Amino acid sequence: MAISLVPWKLCLTMTIITGSKHSDEVDIKSASFLIFCYNNLMKRHFLFWSGYLIVTGLTAGLVAFLLTEAIHLIQTLSFGFSQGSFSTMIASVPPERRVLSLLMAGLLAGLGWHLLAKKGTAIQSIQKTLDDDTQFSPWTQFWHGWLQLTTVSMGAPVGREGASREVAVAVTSFWTQRCNLSKAEQKLLLACASGAALGAVYNAPLATILFILEAILNRWSLKNIYAACLTSYVAVETVALLQGQHEIQYLMPQQHWTLGTLIGSVLTGLILSLFAHAYKHLLEHLPKADAKSLWFIPKVLIAFSLIAGLSIFFPEILGNGKAGLLFFLHEEPHLSYISWLLVAKAVAIYLVFASGAKGGKIAPSMMLGGASSLLLASFSQHFFSLPLSPTLAIIIGASLFLGIINKMPLTAPLFLLEITGQSLTTIVPLAVASLGAYVTYHSYHIIKKDLLKHRQPNQ
């Protein structure tokens, strides 16, 4: 059924009324009837639109749940543990099994994306799908998402949230194409499906609303806000209903802050933002990979082989980054090991993307930020006695890197609050750190602009 703000019957009624030769033909009853019809049609449109949003949220939630179950199954088959989670068990997996799983993941990634490039339509990002009017292939995006899910579950050191977003968009596209919706309405539903799937995976409905508005739509309107709210909560509640609980993935003790903590947060934002922007620049200027070339397969396999070698010494680099963050929180490792683990994870992420393989950046960026901030906090406590607890430092660093690398500075602090189970007051040091990062970034660009002006020859 077509959804239109001004249906044809209403248009016909208005034409008859306004076309009357005698003004007395349009009496109060006719005007009241017209308003009554219009209001009822608007209510009908609102109900239909809400129904589409609910179905979108259900789709995203079901996709997130099924893919999460698939992840656990693939991880069990790849690494052999029958109890516990990947994040807590990966270090106990024999090194040779980790290496074998990475090699198999590399072979699958190389062959899979090569075949998709040769046989399917061009893979495009979710953002490009929403921004451009070009048609995309739901089936290509569907298998693209499953490839990401499988390779990350087998140990690829990148994020798996891209898989749930890609598959949710593909499945939503299957049914929206059969509905008589405008292109703008279809794109809004796809944007909400993409964001809601992320929120369902991480159990972060509030941050997901901001993520949809800030990072995907980049437009703030009542219609967009309503769509983001409804789809996010439906998706999150769908997963909670199927799992039987609202799972907090990175549950941490409640953190408290003082004036000294805020000073440490500002310094963290000022310093770490430089590293985050530098790494973001590195990832944005990768060598172009031609997935249609036969050389693509050995290129990806070599990259995954190097990562397999690193995993012998640093098993926590495997997976999306959750293993590393939990390791920092619960194991109290030596600072030298944290430093080398940080370097190894950064190198591993770069190798994956440089080879042309795909994956998400949300959890990997949080691990990099958490490790960097933990090192900086330890240094600050030792030399300057700044009272910044290791746990809060990890949260602040994860928020900074998440916001900068994924271009979601407003969403990141709220996202960290939700996935760590912190109270709303903890957002203060996170916001202060983000402010420090903002000052550093814009100061750098102002200085750079002034230097370029001085370098120009005098007129």
Image: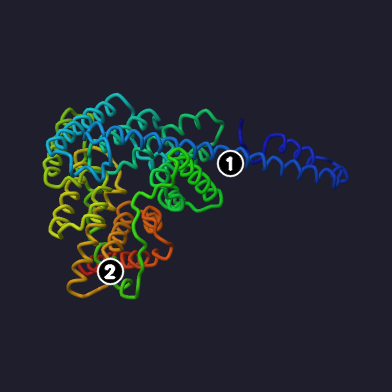
- Residue at 62%, 38% in the rendered image: 4
Badge 1 crowding class, 10 Å Cα cut-off, few under 14, some 14 to 19, many 20 or more, is some
| Nearer to the camera, 442 or 111 | 111
CA gap, disc 2 and disc 1 = 45 Å
Residue 369 in sight here: no
Residue 307 in the image: state x and y as whole percent. 15, 41
Residue 310 in the image: state x and y as whole percent. 12, 44
The first of marks 2 and 1 along the sequence is 1
Q: Is residue 459 above or below residue 46?
A: below
- Residue at 75%, 38% in the rendered image: 15
Badge 2 crowding class, 10 Å Cα cut-off, few under 14, some 14 to 19, many 20 or more, is many
- Residue at 17%, 45% in the rendered image: 315
Q: Is residue 96 above or below residue 31?
A: above
Residue type beneath disc 2? Leu
Q: Quadrant of residue 201?
A: top left
- Numbered disc 2: secondary structure: loop
